[in-house]
Image (cartoon, helix red, strand yellow):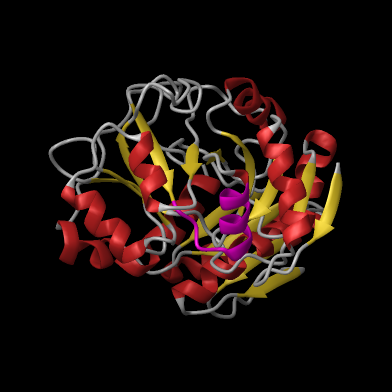
């Protein structure tokens, strides 16, 4: 495994060429997208895709997102491209929006968890786009970390989590957005929101109406049409506890008890909390800024040896839905 620094805005052609060759010959490359770092392999090579699952310790019932460098490439991977997909792609691609559509048979079942659909996305990060276009194959890429852990937003996070399981890590600096893409299922009669992100339902509504919410899966191991739908996900090593703004006294008491027991307590706070917290990180009141900082803050608190992380709940509005989703899953 090697880590190579790459210009995040004008990636060097020789570095991208080397990474593309690794992808084409069945290797694994970690690379920055605008959301988080992805662990990429040739999506049409089942042996290479299996290396992703092995490296992450990821269960086969959790599908992958296939990244493409052009809209036309996504169209070639699916059996139908409805008007809703065309409108969303024109408006939000390249960008942090994933579309779930009926897949063509050349997509290995391992990519889609055996389901008849595939999740596709065109990222906007210059390094990701350069790699996709140089490799000239679609790249399956979940987040570049061990399964269910906090997603990586720097190359250092990738190296810490996956180490020599990756052939090459492209270090493009911190990611721009900080949480994973919004995922919309367009394979049925009505759009369904499978995973919230920074593209909110309010952003989507003028184009496709308000998407529905998915029916609950019958079991934890049932295949999902999208990543990020498992009950527990995005979790730090420390226990993460959410508290409502009107339950500050209870949160302070919890912190005090933990410190008395010899634990190290961290916190992500929107406002000051009068409690014996050793590592408190003030968080922004803007959802975009909060998302950009969230995973890096959780990684930092884990690195500081925190046993307990208290997190003040964020507003219950569409703009904050992606962040609320990540925090609620991390706390389970």
Describe residue 192's horizontal placement relative to residue 71 as left or right. Answer: left
**Observer-nearest residue: 11 or 300?**
11
Q: List x then y, in percent, for residue 242.
A: 51, 57
**Quadrant where the N terminus is found in the figure:** top right
Q: Is residue 127 magenta?
A: yes
Q: List x then y, in percent, for residue 151.
A: 62, 50
**Observer-nearest residue: 152 or 187?**
187
Q: Can residue 304 be seen at all in this image of the molecule?
A: no
What segment is highlighted magenta in the picture? 122-134
At x 24%, y 62%, the residue is: 204
Q: Principal SS element in the magenta part?
A: helix
Q: Can residue 247 be seen at all in this image of the molecule?
A: yes
At x 50%, y 54%, the residue is: 180
Q: List x then y, in percent, for residue 328.
A: 46, 50
Q: List x then y, in percent, for residue 229.
A: 42, 38
At x 37%, y 60%, the residue is: 321
8 in relation to 149, above or below: below
Count of numbered circles in the view:
0
Looking at the rendering, which quadrant does residue 81 occupy? Answer: top left
Q: Is residue 103 magenta?
A: no
**Observer-nearest residue: 9 or 180?**
9
At x 57%, y 41%, the residue is: 141
Describe residue 172's horizontal placement relative to residue 95 as left or right. Answer: right
198 in relation to 46, above or below: below
80 in relation to 133, above or below: above
Looking at the rendering, which quadrant does residue 255 occupy? Answer: bottom right
């Amino acid at each position: 495994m090697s880590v190579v620094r790459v210009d995040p805005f004008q990636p060097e052609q020789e570095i991208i060429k080397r990474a593309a060759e690794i992808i084409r010959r069945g290797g694994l490359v970690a690379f920055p997208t605008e959301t988080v770092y992805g662990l990429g392999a040739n999506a049409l090579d089942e042996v290479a895709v299996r290396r992703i699952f092995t490296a992450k310790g990821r269960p086969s019932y959790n599908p992958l997102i296939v990244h493409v460098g052009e809209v036309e490439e996504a169209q070639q991977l699916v059996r139908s491209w409805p008007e809703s997909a065309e409108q969303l792609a024109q408006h939000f691609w390249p960008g942090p929006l994933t579309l779930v559509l009926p897949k063509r048979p050349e997509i290995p079942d391992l990519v889609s968890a055996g389901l008849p659909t595939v999740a596709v996305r065109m990222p906007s990060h210059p390094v990701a786009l350069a790699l996709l276009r140089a490799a000239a194959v679609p790249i399956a890429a979940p987040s570049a970390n061990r399964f269910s852990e906090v997603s990586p937003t720097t190359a250092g996070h990738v190296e810490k989590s996956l180490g020599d399981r990756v052939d090459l890590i492209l270090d493009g600096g911190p990611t721009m957005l900080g949480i994973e893409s919004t995922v919309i299922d367009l394979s049925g009669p009505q759009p369904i929101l499978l995973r919230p992100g920074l593209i909110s339902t309010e952003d989507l509504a003028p184009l496709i109406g308000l998407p529905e919410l998915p029916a609950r899966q019958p079991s934890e191991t049932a295949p999902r049409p999208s990543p990020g739908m498992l009950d527990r996900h995005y979790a730090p090593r420390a226990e993460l506890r959410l508290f409502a703004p009107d339950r500050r006294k209870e949160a302070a008491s919890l912190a005090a008890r933990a410190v008395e027991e010899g634990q190290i307590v961290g916190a992500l706070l929107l406002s000051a909390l009068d409690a014996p917290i050793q590592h408190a990180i003030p968080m922004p009141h803007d959802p975009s800024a909060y998302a950009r900082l969230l995973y890096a803050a959780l990684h930092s608190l884990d690195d500081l040896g925190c046993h307990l992380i208290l997190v003040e709940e964020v507003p219950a509005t569409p703009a904050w839905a992606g962040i609320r989703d990540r925090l609620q899953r991390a706390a389970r």
